[in-house]
Amino acid sequence: ADESPTKSWWPFPIYDSSSGTPKDAEYTPLDKAEKPYNICVLFPHMKDSFWVAVAYGIVQQAKAEHVNMNLYEAGGYENLPKQISQFDDCMASGADAIVIGAITGAAFKQKFAEAKAKGIPVVGVTNPMPKDALPAANYVDFVDMGSVTAKGLIANLGKDEEANVVTFPGPAGSGWAEDFEKGFEETVKDQKNIKILDKKFGDSGVAVQLRLVQDALQTYPNMNVIWGTAPTAEAAIGAVQLAGRPDMKIISSYENQAMLDALNNGQILAFATQYPVAEGAIAIDQAVRLLEKKPVIKLVQPKAKVIDQNNVKSLNMDLVLAPTDWNPEYSVTAK
Amino acid sequence: MSDVNLAAPADPSTVKAPDEKRSLGTEWLRQLALPIAVLLLLGGFGLADQRILSTYNLLNIAQQTSYLALFAMAQMVVILTRGFDLSLGPTVSMVSVGAALSMAAMGGADANGLLVVVAAILGGFALAGLCGLFNGIVVAFLGVSPLVATLGSMNITLGVATTISGGRPVQGIASSFASFFYTGTVFGLPAPIVIALVVGLVLYVVLSRTVFGRSLYIIGTNPQAAAVAGIPVKRLLVYAYMLCSGLAALGALMMTARTGSGQPNLGGTLSLQSIAAAVVGGTSLAGGRGGVGSAVLGALFITILSNGMNLTRIDGYVQMIVLGAIVILGVVIDRLRLETR
Amino acid sequence: MTTAEGSGAPKDTAEPLLVLSNITKRFPGVLALDGVDLDVRAGELHVLFGENGAGKSTLINVISGTFPPSSGSFRFAGRDVGELSPSEARTIGISPVFQEFSLVPSLTVEENLFLGRESATGGFLDTRAMRHRARELIDELGFDLDPKARVDRLSRAHQQMAEIAKALLGKVKLLILDEPTASLTERETGRLFELIAKLKSQGVGIIYVSHRMREIRALADRVTVLRDGRHIKTLKAATVTDGELVELMTGRRIDVLFPTITHTPGTPAIEVENLTTADGQVAGVDFVARAGEITGIAGLVGCGKSELVRAIYGIEPVAEGTVRLRGETIEKLDPRSSLRRGVAYFPASRGAEGLALTRPIRENVSMAALDLPRYQRGGVIRQFAERALVKPIMETLKLRPPNIERAVGNLSGGNRQKVMLGRAMARDLDIFLFDEPSVGIDVGAKVEVYEFIKRLVEQGAAVVVVSSELPEVLALSNRLYVMHHGKIAALLEGDQRTEQNVLSSFFEEEKREKAA
Amino acid sequence: MSSTVALPAHNTSSASRDILHSLLRVGLLPLLLLIVVVGTSLMSPYFLGWLNVLNILRMASFLAIIACGQALVIIAGGFDLSVGAVVALSSVVTAKVMAALSTALGGPELLVAVLGVLAGLGSGFAIGLFNGLCVSRLKVSGFVVTLGTMSATAGIGLLLTNGIPVYGMPNSFVKAIGRSQVLGFPIAIYIGLAIVMVIAFVQRRTLFGRYVYAIGGNQEAAVVSGVSIRRHLVGTYVLSGVLAALVGILLTALVGSGQATLGGDTMMLQSIAAAVIGGVSLRGGIGRVEVVAVAALFLTILSNALNLLHVDSRLQPIFLGLIMVVAVALDEFSRRRMSSV
Ligand SMILES: Nc1ncnc2c1ncn2[C@@H]1O[C@H](COP(=O)(O)OP(=O)(O)OP(=O)(O)O)[C@@H](O)[C@H]1O
Ligand SMILES: Nc1ncnc2c1ncn2[C@@H]1O[C@H](COP(=O)(O)OP(=O)(O)OP(=O)(O)O)[C@@H](O)[C@H]1O
Ligand SMILES: [Mg+2]
Ligand SMILES: [Mg+2]
């Protein structure tokens, strides 16, 4: 997979939300950059296949456009100060542009201003940014994505089938967990047959989620839907088996390799995707366009989608996850 | 066998003087082991990539160090008394959110001027002070081990931070606040560096020149002896924990200015990192040994290490391994200093 | 009691049990031993005599394998001993009783006795056998020691017993006793001396370190004098006088150990009524100490004499009773306010309660006086003033080496005690509570401490001396309280203050308790 | 004077003191545990449900196993921060080895499972050995060494997997170890119980246990008494590493995949908390693993109870922290009260 850059994945259907309201559009990247720019990439972490997928898109696109790329990961969502320091290090290392998957977008207000003052364009990828904070960004709105998963649940529910949901949005205080939850709640609010029994915030690791799910299984014997992060779903698969509840519906609010496998094995009902590989690729292209002062879509929003048994076969998984045999590369040198 | 010598007895101090002098030389070298290691580290990275020694990056390192150094100093104060503060990280989060909220209450981003800054400072320090007071009372008066006490308050503070912020960033940082704690400069030096320098200097004086500081060392070395000597051990322990939280709060305000918003997860893993920095710099967890120098040195060491690894493009996971190895190495070098004892 | 003569007279012909030649030990900054030669014969009690810091303990540590000498060699039982580890030393029959105890505080006496040589099969402990053996040994020694008690809950005297028992557990060829009686009272000391006599008759060689002339007189066959880490002379005990020994040791003459003190009793400085401590160690005690005199407290180990003064100072919780200082009833006793009222306390365990060992002498001296304006202004320490105040204090006390910036941990026992005394001179005080003021310090230092106490009293201070060393309290005090099981058994004044009376008041008390 | 006269008063009091002391060792913790159990079962009908009880016991076993190792290290005067990372590493190694062997050998699942488990335990052994050797040979503080290995171990785990779960373990392994039950209880509970009992025995009845106490209680005394410090220090770290690895394997079997994020900081902090709440002194020399196991149960039940009682998950840390502090303060208070009687 190394030598052949991504098959032409464009034109890729997206929403152009630059104006504030999403409009249907298609994304087509540049062929090649004019110069081998240095692009610095910041990730919250590389501890799951989701971010590995974003990295895959970034690496492939950097190779395709012949730019230099360096990727730094902060080691987890709890390391905000570290990511801020890495941003400084990026600027100090003479980057031409920065692509950032921010731990929290709001925390970089000052840093973005500094980059702007130094003439370094910054592109936001995957994680949401405050409005107009950056010259270009691409991410799905997490509230939207929560809502998409809710719609997926509704679609998979029989007409009068009751759904008693406990939600496991992720770590409290992360921002994204709260947004996911909000989108989900707002969408199911009007559904008579769907009831949210409780919401359980907690660190998005399998061990922590396992305890939360086990406790919820005991607290709410009538729970029949588990909605939460990918680790929640992973933990839930085992816990549900142990508790003898094969009827449990498990929905994950985002994608990773485990979710894909579990869906194929029929262990979960559905998961949502925001096309992380495409996001990574688009971010690099946006950065190059900014550097070359070419027209750029300010806010690209991939069309988030729920993947379930029905559509999993027909989907282009190359834009969702990295190939299983791909080893993350932290830097790309332009040839 | 030597014969009886009833002539004036040789004064032991003069007899042994040459010996003592010679070892003083090596003693000096030993004391400087870690600073030299830090310089070597910087030099080594500089050889690998010259951007590391650019003025811009050196300033960058200094600025990054100033935050970690503040937290390490905070931690060092309680480590001196044989304690530590696991609630430091969450305190940072809580103060960040609290300060942002009190600023928002004073009129938010549009409000300009001293009033907002004062409100933020008061709000932040009040919250931190409460946390420090809690820690101090639980440790000193209830006799709970510092680990459990601050593990408890860590959870409490975490809960408070996420609850009052609703788990979201708090907007509305006034520009006067940002300039006071972040963007402003004094003689061309960025505000964070200046603040850290001033605090470091003041803390140095407090620890080495005041009754309070002296007492902390004695409490850490031998709490029973301190009590027998009439030092109000319990009260001073409370002060120490409050000072720790206060310094953490100051760091939190600086970081809040740096991020431009109140962040409920700003503290993250700072508790452990600050302990690590203090200990790597030579503060002893057994109490009574350490100082501003050790905290700053430790913070500098860790900052240079990660800055250097970033600029020399070492892969993320490999960085973790290298960091681990070098931390151990650094302490082995530092141990040379203690060979004397 | 025991006599030293007769038992196992050393045979000069056979090779000595232990031969040290040219032993040198260098610590960073200190030459602790400088080419020391020494031999100890089987069945001989060989006293090491020297000032604090002369190198006695260091020599003992070398012999028992704690650390190797920097140079020099030694032979034991006819064999050259090369690298020696502590456990090897024990196996070949060298059994030390250390000055700084080698006990683990969180373990029981029994567990400590067997530490490092437990009876075990395949890694599993044979607890029953060990318990039995421990009990047997302690009974044989006649110590009033509970083998199941945790060491950190024991008094120093009991710890001392445990340490001695530990040394005698295995097969002993050379027994080393580093100030074994430093905190024992007459009774235990007597038992120990009987034991020593028995061991000598069995051909055990003994190295004995003590600062008590009386013991040296009673026990020694030969005496080796060390000074500044050098071997000065080895003499037959029978042919040397105390004065000569002391002169050899210090290089100067000391005529009298105990100074003549003029007591001029004045108003009561401390009045204690019906005092009972929370732990019951002191039960309903009435006690008075006057200005201008020394009030002594004697009693067996565990009688509560320490607790009494500790309660007065405010570190032992009080259950009931009143304490009046100069007529004023004190509601809340705590060290800080005691110091403010001019009361000072000198703990018996200087290591545990007195000194911050890694801190400089200067800080340890000024430690209890930092609230005074002469040391600080507005909480900021006046560094130069502090140095200028502490230096002359330590000069008067003849600190050696006279460098107040060294860590206290590097000082010898006597000098550590001087640091404690220095603390008393660092602020104006007039009530002094001494708990075992001369534990572990050399004759020269003792004289200085006694002189110090004498000066205090003659300047009109009230001094209380708690001591296990009967001659000491008898010689120093004007009035002497004898305690027994937490109560005052007797108050001896004037001519009544004799060793005989003190001992008989113990007995009477014991008899009365038996009867009840 | 008859010297063998034992004071009768003292002997009787020492007998009753013995009983008191054995009570004191356990402290108030079991009582508090009982209160929480009774209280929660009154308020939530699900608390005493069979499955919930099993869940609690299983989770408590995991924590207890790690905490036992941690306790031994702390009793010997050290600290093991690397346990969380070892859990993750052993999970990854076990799963990877099993997956690789499964594809390579195809056949005997038992053999594959055994080799995988051995590999996992081996990784824990290796890290523990490294920790132990560094601490005992280089005489560096355990805190810093294990801080370093924590970072490095986590890095290795991630490097091996890129954070992607490892599948492909034999099904029978997952079924047998992770999900099957014997006499109605999951295997993990038996393993946990056995380990606590064995270590409790080791502490009381073996040379190793005795020496661990001695080294932590007074290292110098242990040295002059001829105890080999190095060997036993290394032993505690190795044991801690292996036990953490064991938990990694058990968790892997439960979850069904190898995960590089399984342990993390939480495991590490919780194991230290369980040890300290269970009466292990951070200054070394004191502590019993059976009490530590009770503390592990206490912590597990506490968070389970908060969930079952519908406490808002943002407020939960506040409750958890407060209860923890209050529990330990009460325990400490009663200990002091009783020992002064
Ligand atoms: N571990 C050590 N490190 C450095 N110096 C030491 C050490 N042990 C002893 N010394 C020094 O060596 C010298 C001899 O000390 P030692 O303890 O042998 O004296 P001593 O004769 O036993 O005195 P005392 O009568 O007070 O017990 C002293 O100057 C002491 O400060
Ligand atoms: N036979 C014994 N076995 C074990 N412990 C004992 C024994 N007798 C007393 N103790 C302990 O000794 C302590 C009190 O003795 P301590 O020596 O402090 O009293 P004291 O009157 O000050 O005696 P001294 O001043 O002679 O040391 C108590 O903690 C008590 O439990
Ligand atoms: Mg000595
Ligand atoms: Mg006493």
Image (cartoon, helix red, strand yellow):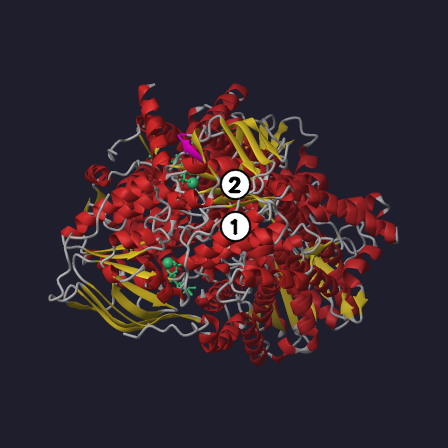
**Residues rendered magenta in the picture:** C481-485
* Label 2 beta carbon within 8 A of ligand 2: no
Q: Quadrant of residue B46?
A: bottom right
**Which image quadrant is residue D210 in?**
top left
Q: Residues within 10 Å of mark 2 (few under 14, many from 20)?
A: many
Q: Is residue C494 visible?
A: yes
Circle 1 chain: C
- Tell me residue B53's x, y (percent): 64, 77
Where residue A290 sits: x, y (%)? 74, 68
Q: What's the mark number on residue B255? A: none
Q: Secondary structure at mark 1?
A: helix
Residue at which label 1 appears: C454
Nearer to us in this view, D289 or C45: C45
Q: Amino acid at mark 1?
A: Lys
- Point out the image quarter for the C terminus of chain C: top left
Mark 1 neighbour density, 10 Å: few (under 14) some (14–19) many (20 or more): many
